[in-house]
Amino acid sequence: MDQRLIILETLLLLNDPEMPSGKTIKQVLDKYDHLKKQERSFIKRILEGCLERRIELDYIINCFSNTKTNRMKPVIRAILRMSVYQLKYMDSIPASAVCNEAVKLAEKKGFSGLKGFVNGVLRSIARQMNEIRYPDEDSSQGMSVKYSCPEWLTEQLMCELGSEYTHKILEDSLKPAGIFVRINLSRITPALLADQLEKEGIGCEAAPYLSYALKLKDIDSVNRINAFGAGLFRIQDIGSMLVTHIAGINRGDTVFDVCASPGGKSMHALDILDGSGHLYAFDISEKKIEPILEGAVMMGGSNYDIRIADATGFHPEYEEKADVLIADLPCSGLGVMGRRNDIKYNMTPDKEASLAALQKDILSNVSRYVKPGGCMVFSTCTVHRAENEDNVRWILENLPFEAVSLDEYLPEELRCDTSSKGYIQLIPGVHKCDGFFISKFRKKNG
């Protein structure tokens, strides 16, 4: 199959907001695993680029087309988006080739009558790309176009975090996301894993903040790495690792992970427990717990129960059983926009409000599983105040918990005014990890 046709067909699939972009792109790349690495990289770059830059691409197209993108046929809109991305961001491809291939795609998909329109719009853009006038980049509209972020979300970020941090977050969301791994310390040391990876031709370097993490370089597929198949490491961002790190799990503890899928924090807990204590990992469906079970087998863990359970429903058999409870809860995901290109387009203010309310429902329920004197870690992968700081205040006012300083678990460079008060907001583009919010509490005796 022609690479550009693969790209077009995938973009049409991704018109469905229910189709998760990352999973869909991975499935396509796996399907065409027989292609050369360069060909797969070409497909991946354009697919991810069209998603990441969709608002900007539409802005450019609309500057030259009388028919605006929201009124175009999906096939023609997708062809123009993927072509404009190549014209603006892939200098190695001649403009003439981009235009010619776009016309061929229109014909292949049965739109011969519109090939003149496609050709005319693209050749005008190619000639005048450097003359396009953009809105003031310090305005919410300007940031929206520059970083392809919905304007309402840009305004929210500016209101809560300020213009400087908003620029940093949105700029970081368009950069390639780093690939970090957490080393299974019960099986191998960081030095030995680094040596083994280098023997397989995989470059790596020390990761920030945590001694048991590495950053991988120049990998095509993690499934092809022998050390991964052997369970010697797990792909996980540093922000996610810090959640379990801050939990302060000790050997022999009973640990609960109440919204555990896909299982990174549960596997981290099993690694720390190293055959002692017990892990209970829950999520809402069979589909959700499958990757947790697979991870536990791959990592060689023991003493665990992985079960289907709704975190909003109380299970009396678990009351006051946990020494440590991890509540990494469903959220708007604004801290991981660089990894999940569709989040910014599918989120709405109403969804944010609904998620903040859901978090309170879950916290009021799962907090009952913590022993007096035990700890609860509440975390999200967002930078939205209503889901983070506001919920910390709600916990302290409504649940029998007190805040616990995070400072003993954090490197000096991460300690701040709020970490001593029991929470930290990690910001992409400012910190060297995804955007995570992490807070810790101890259940009061009596």
Image (cartoon, rainbow, N blue to C red):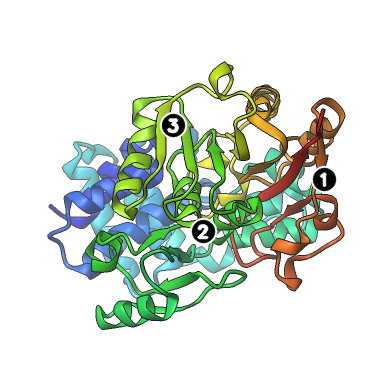
* Nearer-the-camera pick, 207 or 142: 207
Q: Give x and y (percent) for residue 87.
A: 41, 64
Q: Is residue 328 toward the left or the right of residue 8 in the image?
A: right
At 58% from the left and 52% from the top, the residue drawn is 244
Picture disc at residue 384:
none
Q: Is residue 384 above or below residue 414?
A: above
Which image quarter holds the C terminus? top right
Q: Secondary structure at mark 3?
A: loop
Q: Give x and y (percent) for residue 59.
A: 55, 49
Task: Check if mark 3's residue and mark 2's residue have beta carbons within 8 Å.
Answer: no
* Res. 326 in view: yes
At 37% from the left and 71% from the top, the residue drawn is 188
Q: Earlier in the sequence, mark 3 or mark 2?
A: 3
Q: Which residue is mark 2?
A: 237
Q: CA distance from mark 1 to mark 3?
A: 27 Å
Q: Give x and y (percent) for residue 391.
A: 77, 34
* Nearer-the-camera pick, 39 or 228: 228
Q: Which residue is mark 3?
A: 17
Q: Nearer the viewer, mark 3 or mark 2?
A: 2
Q: CA distance from mark 3 to mark 2?
A: 25 Å
Q: Secondary structure at mark 2?
A: loop
Q: Residues within 10 Å of mark 1 (few under 14, many from 20)?
A: few
Picture disc at residue 159:
1
Residue type (three-letter) at the residue carrying disc 1 = Cys
At 30% from the left and 78% from the top, the residue drawn is 196
Q: Earlier in the sequence, mark 1 or mark 3?
A: 3
Residue type (three-letter) at the residue carrying disc 3 = Pro
Q: Secondary structure at mark 1?
A: helix
* Nearer-the-camera pick, 70 or 144: 144
